């Protein structure tokens, strides 16, 4: 059922929870026999060991303060278990002036030249100003982001 009034929408953002699986597409001689083979599955207590925490300025010039790995754990913006990974945004701090809201941005430590990437999301937060995103972009002059 669709919400019919503003009061039907949540007032606080909820954490994004996801599992991330990376697969490699193996190209056989015939498209009719196309098979996929799972190369890695990134989920579990060590999930964040596979990622770099970006804590620099927002390249899109938004009002956000990306947190370091330590800050993210201390502020309880991230957690991981054998079943689930949680990445959330701070929704309790009262901001002063143009201060950015603490948030998490992670980038993979590995680079991939191709493959099938599967991302399972149990929940994507919705709130005023929320912009949950999953980007895949190149890291060279022809594929830089953002431009």
Image: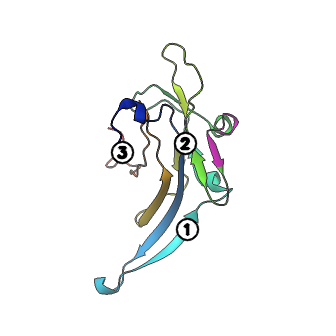
Give the number of the mark in front: 2 or 3.
Answer: 2
- Residue sitting at x 30%, y 86%: 32
Q: Nearer the viewer, residue 14 or 25?
A: 14
Badge 2 local density, few (<14 within 10 Å), some, or many (20+)? many
Question: Sequence order check: which comes first, mark 1 or mark 3?
Answer: 1
Query: Which element is circle 2 on?
Result: loop
- Please name the residue shown 53% across and 45% down the image: 106
Position of residue 64 measured from the top left corner of the image (x, y, whole percent): 49, 28
Q: Which of the marked residues, 1 or 2, is nearer the chain's N terminus?
A: 2
- Nearer the observer: mark 1 or 2; the answer is 2
Q: Quadrant of the C terminus?
A: top left
Assign a secondary structure to mark 1: strand
- On whether residue 76 falls in the magenta region, the answer is yes
Q: Which residues are magenta?
A: 73-79
Determine which residue is flagged by label 3. Answer: 144
Q: Mark 2 vs mark 3: which is more N-terminal?
A: 2
Where is residue 102 shown, x and y percent of the image?
56, 30
Q: Are marks 2 and 3 in contact (CB under 8 Å)?
A: no
Which mark, residue 40? 1
Q: Kindly identify the residue that appears in the image at 45 percent across and 31 percent down.
A: 58
Residue 15's label in the rendered image is 2
Q: CA distance from mark 1 to mark 3?
A: 25 Å
Q: Is residue 97 above or below residue 108?
A: above
Position of 101 with respect to 45 (left or right) is left
User: Within 10 Å of the Cα at label 3, are there few (<14), some (14-19), or many (20+) other Cα atoms?
Assistant: few
């Amino acid at each position: 059922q669709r919400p019919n009034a503003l009061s039907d929408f949540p007032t606080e953002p909820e954490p994004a929870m996801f599992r991330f699986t990376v697969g490699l597409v193996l190209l056989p001689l015939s498209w009719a026999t196309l098979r996929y083979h799972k190369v890695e599955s990134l989920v579990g207590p060590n999930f964040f060991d596979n990622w770099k925490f970006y804590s620099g300025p927002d390249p899109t010039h938004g009002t956000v303060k990306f947190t370091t790995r330590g800050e993210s754990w201390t502020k309880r913006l991230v957690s991981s278990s054998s079943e689930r990974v949680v990445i959330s945004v701070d929704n309790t701090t009262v901001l002063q002036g143009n201060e950015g809201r603490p948030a998490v941005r992670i980038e993979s430590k590995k680079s991939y030249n191709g493959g099938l990437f599967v991302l399972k999301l149990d929940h994507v937060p919705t709130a005023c100003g929320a912009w949950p995103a999953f980007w895949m972009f190149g890291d060279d002059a022809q594929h830089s982001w953002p431009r």
